[in-house]
Amino acid sequence: MTELHCCQLTGFGQPLEVSTRPLPEPRGEEVLLRVTGAGVCHSDVHIAEGGYDLGQGRSLSFKERIRFPLTLGHETTGEVVALGSGAHGVAPGDQVLVYPWIGCGDCAVCRAGQENLCLSPDFIGVNRDGGYADHILVPSARHLVDIAGLDPVKAAPLPCSGLTTYSALRKFGPRLESVPTVVMGAGGLGLMALGLMQRMGAPGAIVVEPDAARRQAALEAGARAVVDPGAEAAAETIRQAADGEVLSVLDLVGNTASLTLALDLLGKGGQVVVVGLMGGDINLPIPYLPMRALTISGSYNGNLGELRELVDLVRKTGLPELPIERRPLHQAEASLEDLRAGRVVGRIVMTPEASE
Ligand SMILES: [Zn+2]
Ligand SMILES: [Zn+2]
């Protein structure tokens, strides 16, 4: 094979274009992978649209950060096919997961192992070409995690929805195992969170989700209760399901309604970890923060060390049983449309072989 097939974004608001380019040859530390799984994430919808809603008519634009054409895709598994002369640590045939949140490697944040928070990111599928392709060039084997023996399609969502929820859940500390957690949203992240919570020893989650099909999916994924936030006395129902007091909320929606409800629910000393990026703003009377001793935390992706921990965890306890729909690569645009319209339960993972 001498060609690379990919689905690229050529401008904000534009449909993805199927494109063919010469297959790159890895140089230096680079590694070339044949893609075995490419997860379709809601962030890809935001990237294709060009920004996030900040509320009150403001938005956070990707304009400065993205160069076109861009191959989307940051949830990628692959098989090593070729290595640059300076690459080591992997061999052709290895099954790997790509850590996409690559930083500059030089700054204090990167040196502390938090390159996902680097101010000069080189994120795969955002700042450089990603996995919506049959092959992907990764800058270094350092960013590859061995997944031998795991299903590469089921493992594909681990570096984004998996790592994002894992890193966010860890921010609750020992409380994760001692009190029930309220989870806002039962999309791909919500179902992943439920699967990981069981594996991390959490006592069960109360899931808040307006969509009936997603609530059902959450029950099947092990939620101890599901609540429609639009129903009458929803907050009271949630408190009852949490044995009377809510101390931990994982907000995977991140809009005005979800965070307002989260802050309303929290008891004294409670913590909300916000992951969702649906957008908007909140009006919070400041005295509530000290008087109720609230903690509002944000969590963004996760670091490479956490991804290795997560892969170890699923090796021991099994991959979370997330509903996964396999699609061929050329359905990338239709998949983004389905996500945008809220029609996806679980995760879509594209497999390039299916399109041949
Ligand atoms: Zn993502
Ligand atoms: Zn850096």
Image: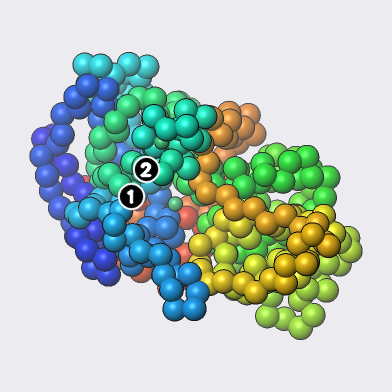
Q: Residue at x 48, y 69 (%)?
A: 54
User: Which percent across, then down, holds residue 130?
Assistant: 30, 45
Q: Is residue 94 visible?
A: yes
Q: Residue at x 68, y 56 (%)?
A: 296
Where, by quadrant of the figure, is residue 259 drawn?
bottom right
Kind of residue at badge 1 = Val
Comparing 354 with 218, the one in front is: 218
Callout 1: 10 Å neighbours few (<14), some, many (20+)? Answer: many
Report the disc number at residue 126.
1
Kind of residue at badge 2 = Pro
Report the disc number at residue 121.
2
User: Which percent across, then down, holds residue 44?
Assistant: 37, 58
Q: Residue at x 65, y 74 (%)?
A: 283
Of label 2 and label 1, which has the lower sequence position? Answer: 2
User: Which percent across, then down, holds residue 30?
Assistant: 26, 26
From the image, state whether disc 2 or disc 1 is nearer to you: 2
Q: Is residue 186 visible?
A: no
Where, by quadrant of the figure, is residue 249 drawn?
bottom right
The quadrant the N terminus occupies is top left
Question: Where 73 sits versus 241, above or below?
Answer: above
